[in-house]
Every structure is written in C-alpha cells, then in structure tokens.
Amino acid sequence: MSERIRVLLSEEEVDRRIQEIGEQISRDYEGKQVHLVCVLKGGSFFLCELAKRITVPVSLDFMSVSSYGSETKSSGVVKIVKDLDEPLKDKEVIVVEDIVDSGRTLSYLLEMLRDRGPKSLRLCTLLDKPERRVTDVHVDYTGFRIPDEFVVGYGLDYDQRYRNLPYIGVVEFD
Ligand code: IMP
Ligand code: MG
C-alpha cells in the first residue's frame, strides 16, 4: 500500500493564520508576559512560528505526555513523560497544541495544569476537528477548523513521519 499527501492547507495559508493569531495574542496580553506551554512533539512547530510573531514578552516551557490507549483512540488518561521545568504559579499561561481531536487528552491536561495555580490558562490550537469531540474543551485560539480526516505536517505525524512538512496535508492510501 502506498501513500500520498494531499495538501489541505498550504504553507502560505498556515503562515498567514499564525501571523493573525500572533497579533491577536499580542493585543490580548498587552502589558503582560505570556508563558507558552508546548505539548511535545506535535505542538513544537506551531509554537516556534507562533512565538516569533508575538510582540509582548514571551517565556516558553515544554512537556511531553502519553495517553494510554491505542494510536487512533486516546483514553484521556495522561501520563507525564517529561514535565515542565518551571512552575506555572501566577503566570499567564497559554497551552499550545497541534490539534484538538476527541479533546480527551487536553481536558485532562488542562485540569492538571490549572491545579498548579496559573494566573490565567488558555488554549491555542493550530487545528480543531470539532466533529470528533467527545469531551468539552474550551479553545481560546484556533488556527483552522478542519473536517474529520487524518492530517500530517506542521508537527503532526503519521507513524512519526511527515512532522517536518511545512504545510498541512491529508494522508491518502492507494
Ligand atoms: P485527543 O484530542 O485526546 O483525541 O488527542 C489529540 C492527539 O491525537 C493530538 O495531540 C495528536 O497527537 C493526535 N491526533 C489527533 N488527530 C490527528 C491527526 O489527524 N493527525 C495526527 N495526529 C492526530
Ligand atoms: Mg498533540
């Protein structure tokens, strides 16, 4: 079985949208410092591009989680594989994610991070698949709402490949 990638969102479209979100965050947090929390590995490409376009002071931290369950269906129970280096207490935190799918992983994660006492906690995702949602998750900043298709690129992988594509594509098999 061979696979092809069909472009869903071009590099230009993604770049333009990230610029807009960066401007919006810069306005919303005027006079403050934002602390961006990246969920590895998927969120890393989006985080770098977004951080470059935010004009208020920015600090960054990274965490890695694994959800118990199969590759295609997350259970929502999250194990921290790599925790944040710094406390979140009194920080203006924005969690930066690649995609919100069922929402299970994020609702669990956000609850856990909220317990650490940030001054504020918001969620920014490059992609959202609202049709797939099973758990209510409030998304504050969304890049694109996309249909229920398996996508890769800009940090998203299929079997650990394609994360480095500078656009968002759909994997097609023939
Ligand atoms: P959920 O929202 O808990 O179902 O899980 C979200 C995670 O599943 C994301 O952070 C991705 O790692 C992965 N995921 C969901 N949809 C896709 C996709 O279309 N392509 C690649 N990974 C995906
Ligand atoms: Mg992810």
Image (cartoon, rainbow, N blue to C red):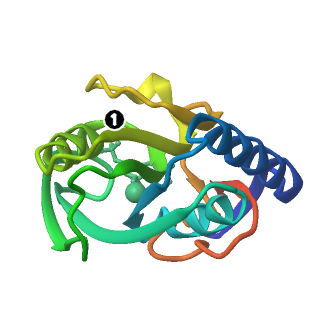
Residue at the image position 42 percent from the left and 40 percent from the top:
123
Residue at the image position 68 percent from the left and 37 percent from the top:
24
Q: Quadrant of residue 145?
A: top right
Q: Is residue 147 above or below residue 31?
A: above
- Quarter holding ligand 2: bottom left
Name the quadrant of the C terminus.
bottom right
**Depth check: 8 or 2 in front?**
8
Residue 40 rendering spot, x and y as whole percentages: 39, 69
Residue 147 rendering spot, x and y as whole percentages: 60, 30
Q: Is residue 8 left or right of residue 48?
A: right
Residue at which label 1 appears: 102
Q: Is residue 156 above or below residue 14?
A: below
Q: How many marks?
A: 1
Q: Is residue 136 visible?
A: yes
Residue at the image position 70 percent from the left and 71 percent from the top:
165
Q: Residues within 10 Å of mark 1 (few under 14, many from 20)?
A: many
Residue 109 rendering spot, x and y as whole percentages: 22, 48
Q: Quadrant of residue 101?
A: top left
Q: Is residue 58 left or right of residue 15?
A: left
Q: Is residue 156 visible?
A: no
Residue 150 rendering spot, x and y as whole percentages: 54, 48
Name the quadrant of the N terminus.
bottom right
**Depth check: 69 or 63 in front?**
63
SS at badge 1: loop
Which residue is at the far right?
A: 12
Disc 1 under 8 Å from ligand 1? The reply is yes
Amino acid tagged 1? Ser
Q: Quadrant of residue 45?
A: bottom right
Q: Is residue 138 above or below residue 69?
A: above
Q: Is residue 31 above or below residue 15?
A: above
